[in-house]
Image (spheres, rainbow, N blue to C red):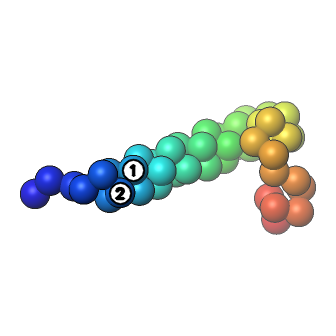
């Protein structure tokens, strides 16, 4: 089955957001989350 243009863009968006979140959590585990969160435009309240 072939994805439509909108479906393909939506899938790419989900994958990109998942990747950003995964990398941020990995940096958090390594103690480097503050810098990564600021670069992503997130605030401490967003991290919980």
Q: Quadrant of the C terminus?
A: bottom right
On the image, the x and y values in percent for residue 25 come to 66, 47
Residue at x-position 14% and y-position 53%: 2
Q: Is residue 21 above or below residue 7?
A: above
Which residue, given by chain and number where applicable, does mark 2 sit on? 6
Res 31 visible: no
Which residue, given by chain and number where applicable, does mark 1 sit on? 9
Residue at x-position 32% and y-position 58%: 7
On the image, the x and y values in percent for residue 38 come to 85, 40
Q: Is residue 34 above or below residue 14?
A: above
Res 42 visible: yes
On the image, the x and y values in percent for residue 11 come to 37, 54
**Residue in the foreground of this view, choosing between 39 and 28:** 39
Q: Marks 1 and 2: in contact by CB < 8 Å? A: yes
Task: Assign a secondary structure to mark 1.
Answer: helix
Looking at the image, residue 42 sits to the left or right of residue 16; the answer is right
Residue with the most extreme left position: 1
**Residue in the foreground of this view, choosing between 36 and 14:** 14
Residue at x-position 39% and y-position 50%: 9
Task: Assign a secondary structure to mark 2.
Answer: helix
């Amino acid at each position: 089955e072939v994805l439509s243009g909108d479906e393909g863009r939506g899938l790419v968006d989900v994958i990109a957001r998942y990747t950003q979140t995964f990398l941020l959590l990995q940096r958090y585990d390594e103690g480097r989350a503050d810098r990564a969160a600021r670069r992503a435009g997130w605030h401490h309240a967003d991290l919980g």
